[in-house]
Amino acid sequence: MKPSTFVLLLATVVLAGSPAAAERHMMQPLVPVDKLVEARALKSPLPNSQEIVAKGKAIYDGKGGCFNCHGTDGGGNGPAAAKMNPAPRNFRHHGFWRHRTEGEIFWVIKYGSPGTSMIGFGPVLSDEEMWSVIQYERTFSGGHGQGRMGRGEGMGPMMGSGGGEHRGRRGGMGE
């Protein structure tokens, strides 16, 4: 085997086994480009309240089964996550909330995310239940990165070199 072929093969094996290969970039939209305007226009009809958060938690942990992939702590580390490529989104990461609207998140819950294991829950959950789950999922952020959430602005600028590179730690609150 030629040295250049060996280096290319080694790099492929190393990258394929890295967490970066298994998780889509945090800044990458979850909604197909041709649906972004529609998704970003969606707004929750529910008031922000602890009652709605509690309903969302019950659905996340129960009927919705969200914890199976996203984990009980929202870190993308549920029991089914290890077999998924790309990995489920980490709701604890501030970048997840900072660079998309609540409408985009709703759209993905309802219709799924092409190219991932995220299926659409439209046939299983009502719109109100999906909005409740989003309120609960927001609690995983620890109050970080909710600047664009719900304002219809969608993803922010890429923030120059290295701006979207931080992936945070799975399961840690210090992100």
Image: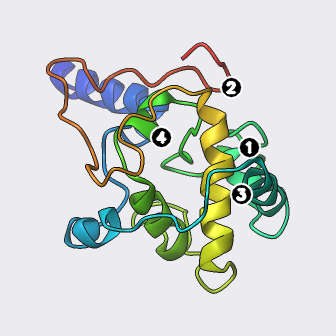
On residue 22, the disc is 4
Residue at the spot of label 3: 66
Quick one: which residue is furthest to the top in this view?
Answer: 174
Q: Which callout, 4 or 3, points to the residue nearer the camera?
A: 3
Label 4 or label 3, whichever comes before in sequence order: 4
Q: Is residue 37 above or below residue 126?
A: above
User: Which residue is painted at 41% across and 62% down in the image?
Assistant: 103
- Callout 1 touching callout 2 (CB < 8 Å): yes
**Amino acid identity at mark 3:** Cys
User: Which residue is painted at 39% across and 35% down in the image?
Assistant: 98
On residue 71, the disc is 1
- Rendering coords of residue 135 (x, y %): 63, 51
Spatial distance from mark 3 to mark 1, Cα to Cα?
7 Å
- Rendering coords of residue 44 (x, y %): 51, 64
Neighbour tally class for label 3: few under 14, some 14-19, many 20 plus, Cα within 10 Å: many
Q: Nearer the viewer, residue 5 or 156?
A: 156
**Amino acid identity at mark 1:** Gly
Q: Nearer the viewer, residue 144 or 112?
A: 144
On residue 171, the disc is 2
Q: Is residue 5 above or below residue 97?
A: above
Q: Which quadrant of the figure contains the N terminus?
A: top left
| Residue 24 visible at all | yes
Spatial distance from mark 2 to mark 4, Cα to Cα?
17 Å
Residue 133 found in image quarter: bottom right
Neighbour tally class for label 4: few under 14, some 14-19, many 20 plus, Cα within 10 Å: some
User: Which residue is painted at 84% across and 59% down in the image?
Assistant: 58
Q: Which callout, 2 or 4, points to the residue nearer the camera?
A: 2
Label 1 or label 2, whichever comes before in sequence order: 1
- Rendering coords of residue 16 (x, y %): 42, 36
Label 2 or label 4, whichever comes before in sequence order: 4
